[in-house]
Amino acid sequence: MAFRAVIRKSASLAPLVGRAIGRVEARRSFGSAILTAAGRRRGCLCGRGHPAGSYLCGYSTAVVSKKPAAAESLLRIVEDEIKAAQETDDHDRVEDVPEGFPFKIEDNLGQQTLILTRQYDGEHMKVEVHMPDLVTGEENDVRDDDDDDTERPTQSSLPLVVTVTKKSGISLEFSCVAFADEIAIDSLSVKKPEKDSEEMAYEGPNFHDLDENLKNAFHKYLEIRGIKPSTTNFLHEYMINKDSKEYLGWLNELKTFVEA
């Protein structure tokens, strides 16, 4: 399964909320106009005929009607976004686990990470999979006159944290980034169970500065334990689907809040 350049088809909530804020401001001006008009009607009769009663009655109507109108406007926008997400996103898609997949998957709804675990040769492995960093064609375009030396990603990637723990409790922690055809190791550190987490422990040298043979040996170390492109390509697709599910769940929670 190869990486796919994925573009969220659902509309971004930010411009929708921006439009909602604009409508709220318009209703504030509208509310002020109501109050002004109410003040001009102080001479009219209301209830028992008291002129002040007319003013208070107009003021109360403006306050009560302004908030629901703004909330209803925001609610309609959120509902439209939910409908769009349901129609366009892969929120209900189920990614088939490939045959021979070596890890147990722990996917908790509402969490932005996926946890994989397995036992290998007396070691306990835990893989924390984060949401993918997607690169589209437009984002990949680089202008010829751009003098910025910052390295730009040229393809989508998947961040991983791989922890291999021995029975004694000591562990190796790899910070990795998985691409379509390779897995890059960004850092490697040794974790001791008795070490005080508040102490500034030496994390080791920059992984890219290590001897080439040592770097290749660690890549092979992870590959043997199941961290290889065939695994991470599946995880990339899985996490794209998870992101769609979590986004739809977030929208529904937002709707519940606005309705309350």
Image (cartoon, rainbow, N blue to C red):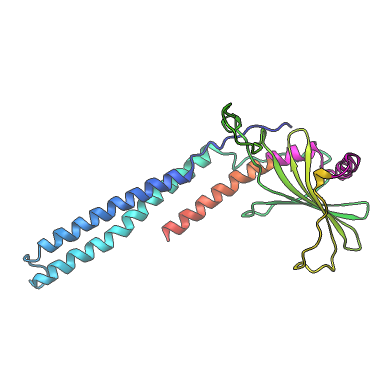
Quarter of the image containing the N terminus?
top right
Horizontal side of residue 142 vs 199, given as left or right? left
Magenta residues span 210-237
Q: Nearer the viewer, residue 233 or 91?
A: 233
Quadrant location of the C terminus in the rendered image: bottom left
- Residue sitting farthest toward the top: 144
Give how far across and how far down residue 185 sits, in percent: 79, 44
Q: In the image, is 54 to the left or to the right of 166?
A: left
Residue 247 located left or right of residue 25: right
Residue 217 in the image: x percent, y percent? 90, 42
Give the residue displayed 63% in from the left and 53% down from the top: 109
Relative to the observer, which residue lies in front, 157 or 9? 157
Residue 255, above or below 9: below
Whether the magenta-drawn stretch holds residue 43 is answered as no
Looking at this rendering, what residue extends furthest in the front direction? Answer: 147
Magenta stretch: helix, strand or loop mostly? helix
* Rendered residue at 81%/46% (across/down): 207
**Location of residue 63 (image quadrant):** bottom left
Asked whether, in this view, residue 152 is left or right of residue 19, the answer is right
Please say if 201 is above or below 218: below
Please report the residue visible at 56 percent of the width from the left and 30 percent of the height from the top: 138
The quadrant where residue 150 appears: top right
Q: Is residue 256 above or below residue 1?
A: below
Residue for point 40% across, 51% down: 75
Residue 141 image point, x, y percent: 59, 29
Residue 181 occupies which quadrant of the picture? Answer: top right
